[in-house]
Image (cartoon, grey):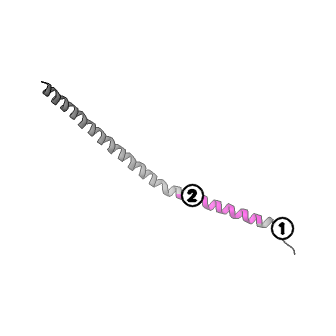
Amino acid sequence: MQRDFRITMFDVKERELEERVVELEEENERMVSERRELALALQKKVPLILAQLRTRDVEINNMSLERDLAEVGSSPVDSS
């Protein structure tokens, strides 16, 4: 009788563990899918961000050039 009970409890535990494995596999698949979607979204953003950075770099360079030109234009001329 004790042996039958242990076998029954083992079978119950085995089923519970098998169900948990299925749950974890499904969760893993869902998480992998979410990560792939996120990676694709980020890959799509990279060109936009690069373009924004390049535009900002040009703007900064232009402002720096204008500042340098303004400083040269306002400096006193040496008349020696």
Residue beneath the point at 27% across and 36% down: 20
State the residue at coordinates (62%, 62%).
58
Relative height, residue 12 to residue 68 (above, below): above
3 and 36: which one is in front?
3
Farthest residue toward the right? 80
Magenta: predominant secondary structure element?
helix
Q: Nearer the viewer, residue 57 or 5?
A: 5
Left or right: 72 in relation to 7: right
- Placement of the N terminus among the 4 image quadrants: top left
* Among the 4 quarters of the image, the one containing residue 79: bottom right
- Specify which label sits upstream in the sequence, 1 or 2: 2
Query: Label 2 neighbourhood size at 10 Å, few (<14), some (14-19), many (20+)?
Result: few
Quick one: 67 or 11, which is closer to the camera?
A: 11
Under mark 2, the amino acid is Leu
User: Is 46 on the left or on the right of 23, as rendered?
Assistant: right
Tell me where residue 31 appears, x and y as whole percent: 36, 44
Q: Which residues are magenta?
A: 50-71
43 part of magenta stretch: no
Q: Which residue bears the numbered disc 1?
A: 76
Mark 1 to mark 2: distance in Å? 37 Å
How many numbered circles are shown? Answer: 2
Residue that mark 2 sits on: 53
For residue 70, which quarter of the picture?
bottom right
Labels 1 & 2 near each other (Cβ < 8 A)? no
Q: SS of the residue at dot 2?
A: helix
